[in-house]
Amino acid sequence: MSAEAGAGAGGSALRWRFCGVLPAVVAALPLLIALALPTAAAAAAGSGFRCRPGSRPVLFNFGDSNSDTGGMAAAKGWHLTRPEGRAFFPRPTGRFCDGRLTVDFLCESLNISYLSPFLKALGSNYSNGANFASAGAATQPRDVPFALHIQVQEFLYFRDRSLELIDQGLSGPIDAQGFQNALYMIDIGQNDVNALLSNLPYDQVVAKFPPILAEIKDAVQTLYSNGSRNFWIHGTGALGCLPQKLAIPRKNDSDLDQYGCLKTYNRAAVAFNLALGSLCDQLSAQMNDATIVYTDLFPIKYDLVANHTKYGFDKPLLTCCGYGGPPYNYDFNKGCQSKDVTACDDGSKFVSWDGVHLTEAANAVVAKAILSSQYSKPSLKFDQFCRA
């Protein structure tokens, strides 16, 4: 199915549905966020899941730099240096972080190895799945590497080649049952929304959501038509709390909320997630033999700033590996890998690693909140797909 077909009558209905209630949602944003925030104890619940004995959990991930475990670095031949990866590995792995990403902690919860990038030729292990996420990825344009559509095509190639090897009597990393029972995770859309916000006023940004959603819909339908039955889809985070966005010159601070985040960016993120959640409801109704879980990451990531002391963070809007000093320590011309950039001493006290991506400490908090299932609809545990 093409993106245009996916955005037909269903896409139009979706657009009108969320646009009709959007003003009320925006007005009630502070209350919605407060109601969605669990206690610290509840946010930490749910870790340590294990699948049924004898089962081998398989995960396939599609997304952008928030879950890229080294795909873009392999594709472009980037030789990243420390401080990337210093908190855990302790070497650069192609992750845009000082350590583990949220997807890494989710893998740990299932007691499986971290996902190897599909594009990494050496040292990869695909026995428990593969990661197709790539830094900078968006849904549009769909035929540009490594857009969501391209990632899905890469998966289909991976699946067909694996099954072909098995048919030849050779060893394939995953068999047909493994592909059918696997969990398919999608975490994309942030780059699309950010690109719109950098060029258009809010109303026009929201009006351009349907084509983005159509690509996500097409990805799910394509995977479903090829046997996938378990989906876990993430909404976007609190875009208005990213130091990169806050460092953009502004006339005044009228668009800042009580925690210092940009209200317009966060309104757009909430609106996008509302529409994405509605899309997941539609897909669940259409694919009644599939499990589609939607998880709203906005309240989780907003809470990192709004209640940062609860998690041990001192500087929620300051970049750890950046340049320029307070209030954001972010310079558009000097990234974390620049020679004259020095990282903070203790990343565990920071929410933002490089102005765009979270620190390992923040990713751990996000993962625990996801595992609590309190932000998911339906409210299923992350290991549900391998213990049913």
Image (cartoon, rainbow, N blue to C red):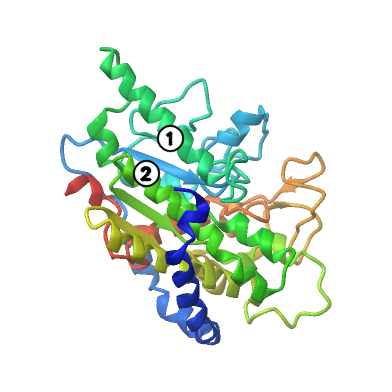
What's the residue type where badge 2 is placed?
Leu
Residue 302 percent location from the top left of the image? 53, 69
Q: Is residue 259 above or below residue 324?
A: below
Q: Could you tell me which secondary element the residue under label 2 belongs to? A: helix
Q: Is residue 229 above or below residue 119?
A: below
What's the residue type where badge 1 is placed?
Phe
**For the point 82% across and 68% down, which residue is it?**
249
Mark earlier in primary sequence (1, 2):
1
Identify which residue, 148 or 91, lies in the foreground. 148
Identify which residue, 292 or 263, lies in the foreground. 292
- Say few, some or many: other residues with alpha carbon within 10 Å of mark 1 (under 14 / 14 to 19 / 20 or more): many
Q: Is residue 190 above or below residue 161?
A: below
Q: Which residue in the protein does label 1 denote?
A: 155
Tell me where residue 78 sits by quadrant. Answer: top right
Residue 79 percent location from the top left of the image? 68, 29
Identify which residue, 232 or 73, lies in the foreground. 232
Q: Which mark is residue 382?
A: none
**For the point 26% across and 53% down, which residue is it?**
290
Q: Could you tell me which secondary element the residue under label 1 belongs to? A: helix
Residues tagged 1 and 2 counted as in contact (Cβ below 8 A): yes
Q: Is residue 110 visible?
A: yes
**For the point 38% across and 65% down, which residue is it?**
43
Q: What is the distance, in whole Å, between disc 1 and disc 2 at their CAs?
A: 9 Å
**For the point 41% across and 33% down, which residue is it?**
156
145 vs 184, left or right, is right
Q: Which residue in the protein does label 2 denote?
A: 223
